[in-house]
Amino acid sequence: MKRLVLSLISVVFFISVVHAENQENNYEWSLVTTSDQVATLKLTGRVIPKEEALSVESARIQGRIVSILKREGDLVKEGEALFIINSPECISLMMDKQIASQKGLEDLLKSAFRREKQLGLSVSDSCRILSSITGTLIKKQIELGSSFNVGTLWLLSLIQKK
């Protein structure tokens, strides 16, 4: 019985080797060349540009511009308010902060402050978009009353030396 099993294993092994050699001849070989195609790499995180470089800021939430606080040519500092907006997400965040303060819910309050920082907002009596860099405002991409979505370009700034 052992001989029969060993014989069958040997035959199967021989057939697989012969089959593999035949498969190797079916591949077509060609020269590898470069192309003009550009691949994009999508990553999460924050890109920190060099000093004296251009910085493009975009919306992290959706809403509508209520007031413009900074104009083209103005120097803005990191954390300074650029726009006052009306946004459902901002109103929800404002309510979370109020309820957490009234009820003494520290976890909810910490979560609201974290979310506020992630979105680049200052939420109190109004919702303000904050600058993420220090620089000179070169060009605004939106106007008073404009509605915006996540990813809409806000402005173009020239980053100042520190």
Image (cartoon, rainbow, N blue to C red):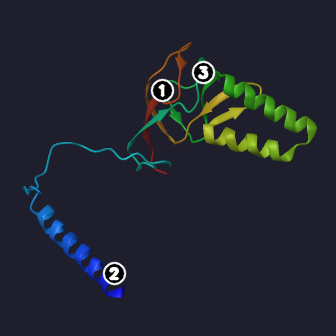
In terms of sequence position, does the residue under pointer 1 or pointer 2 come before the other?
2
The image quadrant that residue 3 belongs to is bottom left
Residue topped by disc 2: 5
Mark 3: which secondary structure? strand
- In the rendered image, residue 112, in percent from the top left (x then y), is placed at 74, 40
Q: Amino acid at mark 2?
A: Val
Closer to the camera, 38 or 132?
38
Task: Using the numbered discs, state the Cα–Cα distance from disc 2 to disc 3 in whole angstroms.
Answer: 74 Å
Closer to the camera, 68 or 110?
110
Is residue 124 visible to the viewer in this orientation of the structure?
no
Residue topped by disc 3: 63
Q: Residue at x 45, y 44 (%)?
A: 160
**Circle 3 Cα neighbour tier, 10 Å, few/some/many (<14 / 14–19 / ≥20):** some
- In the rendered image, residue 38, in percent from the top left (x then y), is placed at 24, 43
Task: Using the numbered discs, state the Cα–Cα distance from disc 1 to disc 3 in whole angstroms.
Answer: 11 Å
Residue topped by disc 1: 152
Closer to the camera, 110 or 49?
110
Q: Is residue 66 above or below residue 34?
A: above
Q: Is residue 150 left or right of residue 121?
A: left
